[in-house]
Image (cartoon, rainbow, N blue to C red):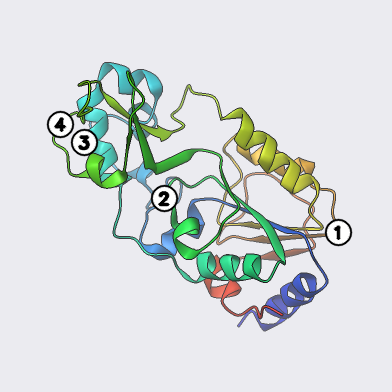
Amino acid sequence: MYEHEVEQLQKMIDESARIVFFGGAGVSTESGIPDFRSADGIYHQSYQYSPEQVVSHSFFIQHTEAFYDFYREKMMLLDAKPNAAHKKLAELERAEKLTAVVTQNIDGLHQAAGSKCVYELHGSIMRNYCMDCHTFYDAAYVKHSEGIPRCKKCGGIIKPDVVLYEEGLDGETIKGAVNAIRNADMLIIGGTSLVVYPAAGFIDYFHGKNLAVINKSETGRAVRANLTVAAPIGEILSRVAVR
């Protein structure tokens, strides 16, 4: 199954030298991390507050403890391991075929797999900072704290370095991601519904030769892809040879 699609993808990768991968939640579902928008995703589950409310800046400020109850349970899955997609992308980077990963995910799995050039558009659960003195705390400290995690130095509230609703993306991260996409000769879009903006708009900067989309469902916007594969991304990328 998918033999023809994998063959096409292999040909595109073989003839490319500056590949950029643009990915979303579907990349990590094969690692056991739930996405948000699929039929059984977090947005379709019942909570006292909607997930959109909980992961907003105003909710974090006004209901910090409730935010952390949700965040620790649903977003800090620290036992998750990189899957075949993460590993293949890291392998492509080591072979100097792939120049960057641009991800909407906050789980740190691309780096755990060995990827070095990763633009995390929405931040990372692996980084947490005191809102008062800016002391850094790792994910384990936040995960295993009780109630509202506080700084050991000054007692200030610790905030995850993730982009919540109502917050803007980091300017330097945007600049790096856009430049990588603009200079790519191949863009692989994977595991994303392309409905979250401004991130989804970044693909408009791609003017290279080959554009491949690998996603289980249709994307929320039309892209002029040379290849579209409706399948789990790990299943497809695992069959690609790096040469």
Which residue is tagged 4?
A: 147
Residue 192 visible in the current orientation: yes
Q: Do tag 4 and tag 2 residues touch (Cβ < 8 Å)?
A: no
**How far across and down, in percent of the image, does residue 156 sit?**
24, 20
> Please, what secondary structure does the residue beneath circle 2 have?
loop
> Please, what secondary structure does the residue beneath circle 4 have?
loop
> Please, what secondary structure does the residue beneath circle 1 have?
loop
Q: In this view of the protein, which residue sits in the foreground, 150 or 216?
A: 150
Q: Do tag 1 and tag 3 residues touch (Cβ < 8 Å)?
A: no
Mark 1 vs mark 4, CA separation in Å: 51 Å
Q: Quadrant of the C terminus?
A: bottom right
Quarter of the image where one finds residue 138: top left
Whichever of callouts 1 and 4 sits on the residue coming sooner in the sequence is 4
**Label 3 neighbour load within 10 Å: few <14, some 14-19, many 20+:** some
**Label 1 neighbour load within 10 Å: few <14, some 14-19, many 20+:** some
Mark 4 vs mark 3, CA separation in Å: 8 Å
Q: In this view of the protein, which residue sits in the foreground, 98 or 71?
A: 98
Which residue is tagged 3?
A: 69
Q: Quadrant of the N terminus?
A: bottom right
Whichever of callouts 2 and 1 sits on the residue coming sooner in the sequence is 2
Mark 1 vs mark 3, CA separation in Å: 46 Å
Callout 1 amino acid: Lys
| In this picture, residue 95 sits left or right of residue 104 | right
**How far across and down, in percent of the image, does residue 141 sit?**
23, 42
At 30% from the left and 54% from the top, the residue drawn is: 78
**How far across and down, in percent of the image, does residue 66 sit?**
22, 28
Disc nearest the viewer among 2 and 1: 2
Q: Do tag 4 and tag 3 residues touch (Cβ < 8 Å)?
A: no
**Label 2 neighbour load within 10 Å: few <14, some 14-19, many 20+:** many
Which residue is tagged 1?
A: 209
